[in-house]
Amino acid sequence: MQTAGRTEEHPAGGDQDASDGFPEQGEGIRVSRRQFIRGAAVLSALAAAGGGWWGMTRHLALERVAVPLRGLQAPLRIAMVTDTHLRSGGALQPFTNERMVSEALSMAADEQPDLFLFGGDLTSETFGGGIGSARRMIDLMAGIGPPLGSYACLGNHDMTAQSGDGILAHYASSSVRLLKDEWVVLDTSAGPLSLGGLGYCGSGYEDAAPLRETNSPRPRILLAHDPTCVLYLDDLDRIDLIVCGHTHGGQVHLPFVGAPWTPSPAYPTYYRGLKALTPRSYIYVSRGVGTVFVPLRVGSRPEVTVFDLSPLPESGEERESI
């Protein structure tokens, strides 16, 4: 167990939600982005006065997610970090700083994963990040060096007009491989594994045709920034596990209400935790590390995710569909 944050266990076999003990109810209350920002600003001031702002926003949780995969021949461990939104400006600036990002990456590395994944949104251009912060984030990820390598996908904040081309160029020169609407086959100790990555397409994933891989006995894991991909991808039963970020778990997640707003049309069904998509496939949506709009999290602690994958017995029961 990491001393830097709490450890949560999320076994597959039913819907799981990493909700910090706050229950869900119905579809929650939908508010506009402007209302969310105004309300979060008020909560930020109140929480800061009591010290809760710093603890909830900066105290990383280590989430363990156990998932059985078809075709896997032995256990495999994957660590994931997403939505760092790294911003320059020193340790005391209120948004995500390098110290917090380094802590998250150290937590991931300490778990000795076979594979490392990054789910997009290196920095927040609008809120003081930029190409320098993005390059620094890629360099920090390159230091993990797991046996099967490190892979990333693009987030919406990565493809701004100011820094998009520079980010692509820096990935190209890095040991962290960027996946854009493509599959790679990894030769692992658990047998061959197909890893796919989606390029962020804004409101849709119509360009994801290369992800329609031919039928294969290999287990398939898809890395995508936004869980909205489940609304566009065909034949989800052919993908064993989709891992995403983007929503920050709501960033503000209130008791008995849930998240007032998330930036994904997949809300409220897919915005945090582990869910069954079909009897044979799952999606996991991470709460991520950083923040946007306001430097505040309530009921939605930042997380580092560790997936402990195991072989699915041939005689095992099919997964419960939501």
Image (cartoon, grey):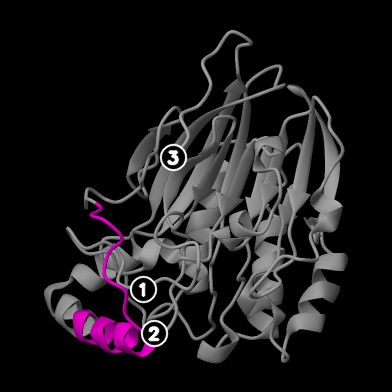
Secondary element type, mark 1: loop
Q: Quadrant of residue 146?
A: top right
Q: Residue at x 42, y 79 (%)?
A: 95
**Magenta residue span:** 24-43
Horizontal and vertical percent position of residue 68: 57, 25
Query: Local crowd at mark 2 within 10 Å, few (<14), some, or many (≥20)?
Result: some
Marked residue nearer the N-terminal end (3 or 1): 1
Q: Which mark is residue 322?
A: 3
Q: Residue at x 53, y 51 (%)?
A: 106
Horizontal and vertical percent position of residue 321: 48, 34
Horizontal and vertical percent position of residue 21: 22, 48
Labels 2 & 1 near each other (Cβ < 8 A): yes
Marked residue nearer the N-terminal end (2 or 3): 2
Q: Nearer the viewer, residue 47 or 256?
A: 256
Is residue 31 a member of the stretch shown in magenta? yes
Horizontal and vertical percent position of residue 282: 55, 39
| Residue 173 visible in the current orientation | no
Q: Amino acid at mark 2?
A: Arg
**Vertical placement of 159 versus 269: above or below?**
below
Secondary element type, mark 2: helix
Q: Which mark is residue 261?
A: 1
